[in-house]
Amino acid sequence: MNEHNVIPDNWYEDAFGELYSIVYAHRSVASALPEAAFAARATGLNPKDRLLDLCCGTGRHLANLLQNGGGVSLCGFDYSPELLAQAQKNTRGLVPLIRGDMRALPFQNTFSVVFNFFTSFGYFMEDSENEKALLQMEAAMLPGGRFFFDYLNPDQIEARLVPESTRESKGYLIHEKRWIDEHTKRINKNIIVERDGQIIGKNSESVRMYALDELKAMLLRAGLHIRQVWGDYDASPYDTLSPRMLVLGCKDAS
Ligand SMILES: C[S@@+](CC[C@H](N)C(=O)[O-])C[C@H]1O[C@@H](n2cnc3c(N)ncnc32)[C@H](O)[C@@H]1O
């Protein structure tokens, strides 16, 4: 495995299956609690809102919003049948969950709030395809709607890149190799999961690292405006070494 490895264009179709829940076991319902609370505060979430968790995965943020969201109407959307099945359990069948591709959302002028957590953007190889996801998000929102976007910080990724690591999760060994492709501006990762000396699965990930200015321009073209940016869930300011790029924004009121 080296940096000349080719990651398939449609890597996201396979990367969010059973293996994902082993590799990201620490991304639990409990760890999502402060994130959901932060996004709810940032967007001024209130019981009249209709909220879409775009790329909801296992529904870990929805589960918290169900508990603490004051009765706000919730909906989850994701591509992975495996993670949606988990979301169904985590939300006790109380939240509508819809399967599909973020580039073709089945909603028009429907939601007053959209959340997008844990780097669920920049997956497609073409910028125009990533932009399509933002256009679809805008179309799904009501005029004046708010969105919260939890995305990676490209500068921090570049400064802190760990090219190779091995860790243990739920009795499995997770080997991860990471590299940045300067040409495509993507952070790529190859993952091997091992148990008792046997390889039980492999995954690849590849995310376009949009700088804040690039994201801002893409959002603007989609009719969405940034209102505030933080560097992490402790509300610290965004800078080159911030762990995250947390963006609060809105759609025009008319
Ligand atoms: C990094 S996970 C984050 C999941 C969730 N937001 C969380 O915080 O746990 C990215 C999610 O995007 C979903 N996804 C990947 N490609 C997608 C696509 N083309 N359309 C919709 N969802 C997609 C995956 O299935 C996965 O649940």
Image (cartoon, rainbow, N blue to C red):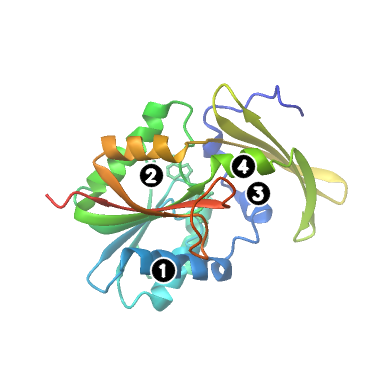
Residue 100's tag is 2
Rendering coords of residue 246 (x, y %): 45, 54
Residue highlighted by disc 1: 93
Say which quadrant the N terminus sits in: top right
Residue tagged 3: 19
- Looking at marks 1 and 3 on the same chain, the residue that comes earlier in the sequence is marked by 3
Extreme residue in the left direction? 254
Please state which of the two labelled residues, at mark 1 or mark 3, is closer to the viewer: 3
Q: Are marks 4 and 1 in contact (CB under 8 Å)?
A: no
User: Residue flagged by tag 3: what amino acid is it?
Assistant: Leu
User: Residue 136 sits in which quadrant?
Assistant: top left
Please say if 22 is above or below 30: above
Query: What type is the residue that disc 1 sits on?
Result: Gly
Q: Is residue 176 above or below residue 60?
A: above
Q: Is residue 62 above or below residue 190?
A: below
> Is mark 1 in CB contact (under 8 Å) with mark 3?
no
Task: Residue under label 4, please give it.
Answer: 157
Task: Compute the Cα span from label 4 to label 1.
Answer: 37 Å
